Amino acid sequence: MSANGTWEFSSLPPGKKLISSKWVYKIKLKSDGKIERFKARLVAKGFTQRQLDVNNAFLYGDLMEEVYMKSL
């Protein structure tokens, strides 16, 4: 993700909070029990999230605010 510009490393500005994260792995199985594929996703960890309604959750655009996540 770093290679395609999804994020960049930076120092935490004063007054900002970090969002912890973790990787979640899942193995998708076929109906016969054989492995179909492996899946991984990076998720926010803890109770630092805020709820909001999004019309299109997979909108390919820039965020209007900066998000600071803790490096794994």
Image (tube, grey):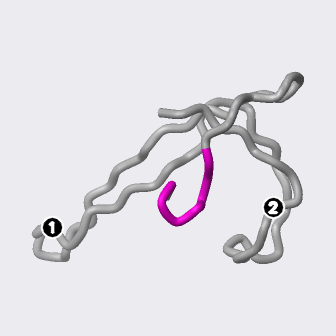
Locate residue 45, reporting x and y percent: 59, 35
Q: Residue at x 55, y 37 (%)?
A: 21
* Quadrant position of residue 28: bottom left
Q: Is residue 54 magenta?
A: no
Q: Which residues are magenta?
A: 2-8
* Quadrant position of residue 36: bottom left
Q: Alpha carbon of mark 2 to alpha carbon of mark 1: how far?
A: 36 Å
Q: Dot 2, how many residues are within 10 Å of its Cα: few (below 14), some (14-19), or many (20+)? A: few
The amino acid pointed to by label 2 is Leu
Q: First in sequence: mark 2 or mark 1? A: 1
Q: Residue at x 70, y 30 (%)?
A: 11
**Does dot 1 land on a helix, a strand or a loop?**
strand
Q: Nearer the viewer, residue 8 or 50?
A: 8
Whether residues under marks 2 and 1 lie with C-beta atoms below 8 angstroms apart, the answer is no
Q: Residue at x 81, y 48 (%)?
A: 66
Residue for badge 1: 35
The residue mark sitting in front, 2 or 1, is 2
Q: Nearer the viewer, residue 41 or 35?
A: 41
Left or right relative to 50: residue 27: left
Locate residue 14, reporting x and y percent: 86, 23
Q: Which mark is residue 63?
A: 2
Locate residue 1, reporting x and y percent: 49, 58
Q: Dot 1, how many residues are within 10 Å of its Cα: few (below 14), some (14-19), or many (20+)? A: few
The amino acid pointed to by label 1 is Ile
